Image (cartoon, coloured by chain):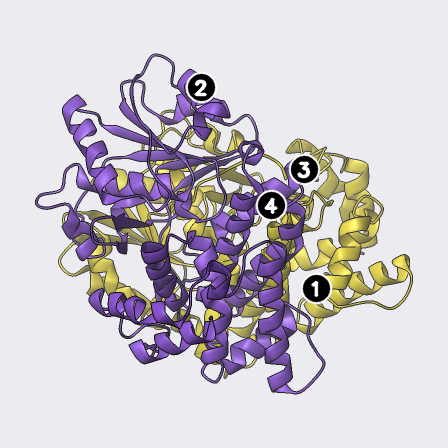
Chain colours: A yellow, B purple
Amino acid sequence: MLNFDFHNPTRIIFGNQTIARLDELIPTEARILLLYGGQSARASGTLHEVREALGFREVQEFGGIEPNPSYETLIRAVDTVRIHRLDFLLAVGGGSVIDGTKFVSAAVGYDGDAWDILETRGASIRQALPFGTVLTLPATGSEMNNGGVVTRRATQDKLPFRSPHVFPQFSILDPTKTQTLPTRQLANGVVDAFVHVMEQYLTYPIDARVQDRFAEGLLQTLIEIGPLMLEESADYSTRANLMWTATLALNGLIGAGVPQDWSTHMIGHELTAQHGIDHARTLAIVLPANLEVRREAKRAKLLQYAERVWHISQGDEEQRIDAAIQQTRTLFESLGLPTRLSAYQLGADVIDALINQLAAHRLTALGEHADVSLDVSRRVLEASL
Amino acid sequence: MLNFDFHNPTRIIFGNQTIARLDELIPTEARILLLYGGQSARASGTLHEVREALGFREVQEFGGIEPNPSYETLIRAVDTVRIHRLDFLLAVGGGSVIDGTKFVSAAVGYDGDAWDILETRGASIRQALPFGTVLTLPATGSEMNNGGVVTRRATQDKLPFRSPHVFPQFSILDPTKTQTLPTRQLANGVVDAFVHVMEQYLTYPIDARVQDRFAEGLLQTLIEIGPLMLEESADYSTRANLMWTATLALNGLIGAGVPQDWSTHMIGHELTAQHGIDHARTLAIVLPANLEVRREAKRAKLLQYAERVWHISQGDEEQRIDAAIQQTRTLFESLGLPTRLSAYQLGADVIDALINQLAAHRLTALGEHADVSLDVSRRVLEASL
């Protein structure tokens, strides 16, 4: 096991009827900016429920945070906070709204050009406004971690950042809030969480037994509940399991003390930035190809994955690895997420531009061995055609 | 899944060479009470290493905290803190030292008779001194939770308490510090962690899939590494796995959103208080008997435990349950922990006094269904003869 430093101070309030607890979680005198995305938060009644819970507190609203939240939009939220001298942020939404809120929390008091926060990947953050979240879309884990991703529309830069200053103070996870979500978003959430686990698990063995068991437990759970989530009638219990699984998939726990990959995410980000493909859908395209291309370096863990997660015991090593990758592909496809670029009418001609953007973002040595060069990324994209 | 409120702000610094990081974790101006147990902390060099890391900070020492720390001893530590106007506590040891430090942290500023903290099980705690820990004995999980157990020698009362105010600020987990521990303590640690998981897992099904998978992963890990830990040559990696497993066994995570039992602990506490049996050794005696006596109420989970943890697939339900309980017993015995009271020369004549103490402590409705009456506890003790 590698040495590690694990600290996750976010408080999780989980269950139905929990939004009312905002009243005890936020100081009475707080001056709040309530951030949200599209009109679904209003239409579903969640925004109203939140406003009710906040009672007589001063609240300004800032809606319209997009999927893959943009720097351009978020800077306007920063201005709103400054103009109204607000001192607490409350995100109501999924990963995009929460990621955006983290950026706003750090940018409000930032000394200098706020884009530096992204350029330094968060290292330049010295303080942040306190904030909480009400999660409406299980997927990204942002509700219980200290990272985010922001896109600059003007330049198609999609960049991650993290900082110990941007943990949510609390997150309210009410599984009933997933009931109005479109199937597509729920399916995306399952795959997003699945790939989060894989980025921290499918590397090389380091005798980190609990981390492996926990990762395998999350993957097994997602395999079990994924298909159930596609049914509109998915019950509370299944929704609750997805919500908590997605949070634990990326709250730092299973990644503590183990090597991590993340090359699938970095390549996927360029696909979203240049071709507008949903984040989770880019992961479904890149992961299987990535495992194929790097199967030698990942051999031992691929075999463990085949055995423990998919219970594959037939065939020689190559066959078991092939079967595990195929099962992964089949899972994503069964959830409605294509695993080939061709499904998006994208061919080999788009690869050069994607590689150029990876180069521009200095993403030239990705993966657990820092050996995913631009050439390897190119091969991964070729394998995903 | 049940609604839950999960918050664990303790920072974990894990790995070798980590004690030096005390210098960055504790304010330079802190006035520290360093609490420890017997002379092993000094003999092993850990105390010296800690003092070196603390540099020129003002440090008072308080040694002699016993296994099953006593109220009588801890009150003297409280006096030391008050006399020297200290403002930070640092526990160096295992669960007893850390539990004791939690009590001291809460008692120093307590308004009233400090025994009330135990009488109210911690509910009366309003504030506590900040403290950190350097863990030397993996077992109790106290290094990353907000509970403790204190014994009043005069009356043989052994009582638990918990409070959101007594989370360690940080805990340093250096697996090399387990190298000088006697085999008996390491074996106790494995069983202690195992039973902590069982108290949160082996109840009744509630479709909390990740909690179940995580619990099963911890149990499987303990089954794998338990025997390895008995060899003096156990390597760093195995020690690291035990340390992190024991922490995760009782940091609140696997217990969030699920029913919990804890009757084995409560009955075991009386055995320690009256007969001086090591805490973990009381659990090894009580758990198998408890599972036998309550097998109907625990049937579904016993079958899941048999299948997933012990891979038992042969026989009918009764046989699979019998086999799982027997495997549990065999595991404990193989680690050197007897599973019968007779091994301690205790017979049926001690049961009345134990039941009387459970009654005196109002522990008359234990377990996940609150149906472990004094009569059921008596049957458990009878089954453990």
Amino acid marked by disc 2: His
Point 15% across, 45% down: residue: B114
Q: Position of residue B253 (x, y in %)?
A: 44, 57
Which residue is at the far top? B56
Q: Relative to A225, say whether A244 is above or below.
A: above
Determine if residue A339 is in view: no
Do marks 3 and 1 share a subunit? no
Q: Which mark is residue B241?
A: 4
Dot 3: what SS? Answer: loop
Q: Relative to A384, say whether A327 is above or below.
A: below
Of the residues under marks 3 and 2, which one precedes in the sequence? 2
Q: Relative to A167, say whether A193 is above or below.
A: below
Q: Is residue B311 left or right of residue A8?
A: right
Question: Mark 2, mark 4: which one is toward the viewer?
Answer: 2
Do marks 4 and 1 share a subunit? no
Displayed quadrant of residue B97: top left
Of the residues under marks 4 and 3, which one precedes in the sequence? 3
Amino acid marked by disc 4: Asn
Point 18% across, 57% down: residue: B120
CB atoms of marks 1 and 2 within 8 Å: no
Q: Is residue B55 left or right of residue B71?
A: right
Dot 1: what SS? Answer: loop
Q: Position of residue A366 (x, y in %)?
A: 70, 37
Dot 4: what SS? Answer: helix
The residue beneath circle 1 is A309
Q: Could you tell me which chain the residue with mark 4 belongs to? A: B
The residue beneath circle 2 is B48
Amino acid marked by disc 1: Val
The residue beneath circle 3 is B235
